[in-house]
Amino acid sequence: MAGVPSLTTTFPVRRGERQLVSPARPTPYEFKMLSDIDDQDVLRFYRSGAFFYRSNASAMAGLDPVEVIRSALSEALVHFYPLAGRFRELRPTRKLVVECTGEGVVFVEADADVRMDDLGDFLAPPVPCYDKWLCEPESPTADVVDRPLLYVQVTRLKCGGFIFAFQICHCMADGIGTVQFLTALTEFVRGVPGAPTLCRRPFRYALQLLLEAKARASREGYVQSVAGFNAARRRPPFPKARTYLISDVTQAGMLAVDFGWGRPVYGGPATIMLASFHQEGRNEAGEPGIVVPIRLPAPAMERLKRNVRKGLGAHVDVETKTTADETNSNMHGGAPVLAKL
């Protein structure tokens, strides 16, 4: 397995000035109240993602990914206009509502003096140099009120490839919801006729889908019980201490997010903040599988490797790679590493 550069590797990244990309056409001005499930304190932060694309002599050859994605983003926001708004907090309940102002989302273009191959042949969260691809610092908490709900940075690479990275307020979308938005965005980039599919139908079609989904959830009882519990307890904080969070995004379709340059080399969470993600992945031979990042101090990872070898057989090759230096880790007893089985 080829080495992965340390996050201390230095190469210049030139960022342009931040821009606000607003919907391409007027959108409704209204207020949308969040559900008691979405409006939890534990979700008041920005979840990040990163998609790495190689240069591709395709129909997109000669086009600047920064320009086409920026233009498509403006079109997509016409249909996903709450993302262009701002959160307001009602008093005294602290209930979040989206004021659909159409102000826009933050967009940053950048250029990096690095090639895709320099980043290694096996990408997994935390992706190499993630702080260079994200335009906002990563944090498990954030003040989401009166701020943009989506931040996007598109970084051109020396090899002709590019990296699309974003940070979206988790109150607005989970993994599947985010991929739905990104899929619509890619359709506008590629000029798919009538994109996206939902936008070709009348509004009553979308409303009917929503009502059917809510009815199914109510029959199952789970969403109704969680919403009722949160409302009765005023959305109690989720206990994070000594809690191991797993988020399965294997069915979210992240590796299918294609802007026209082909499927990404990697597509998924940029970091492993707050949770361990189970996601789609492929090894160096192109075989599909599931990537399960585990972030542990180096001595603990060595013990895990020994136990895995013992359980799966001595012939199994287990490799590790350092993914962050001590300064970027909140772990003790050594730099965090990833085990590759």
Image: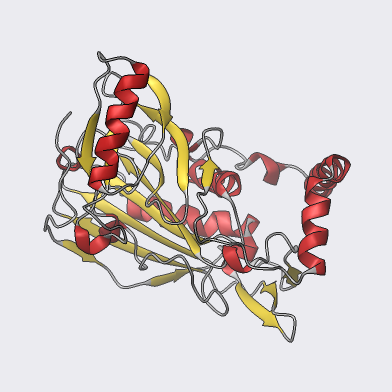
In terms of image quadrants, where is residue 75? bottom right
Left or right: where does residue 208 sit relative to residue 333? right
Viewer-closest of 43 and 246: 246
Viewer-closest of 119 and 307: 307
Q: Whole-percent x and y of residue 101?
A: 63, 75
Left or right: where does residue 121 sit relative to residue 191? left
Q: Whole-percent x and y of residue 282?
A: 36, 26
In this picture, is 317 found above or below 74? above
In terms of image quadrants, where is residue 208? top right
Left or right: where does residue 284 sit relative to residue 136? left
Residue at the spot 20% in from the left edge and 64% down from the top edge: 14
Do we see residue 62 in this rendering?
A: no
Residue at the spot 42% in from the left edge and 24% down from the top edge: 289
Coloured how? secondary structure
| Residue at the extreme left | 10
Do we see residue 72 in this rendering?
A: yes
Which image quarter holds the N terminus? top left
In this picture, is 200 found above or below 234? above
In this picture, is 87 found above or below 5? below
Viewer-closest of 338 and 262: 338
Q: Whole-percent x and y of residue 243?
A: 52, 54
Q: Whole-percent x and y of residue 263?
A: 39, 32
Which image quarter holds the C terminus? top left
Residue at the spot 30% in from the left edge and 47% down from the top edge: 127
Left or right: where does residue 185 sit relative to residue 227? left
Residue at the spot 74% in from the left edge and 68% down from the top edge: 32
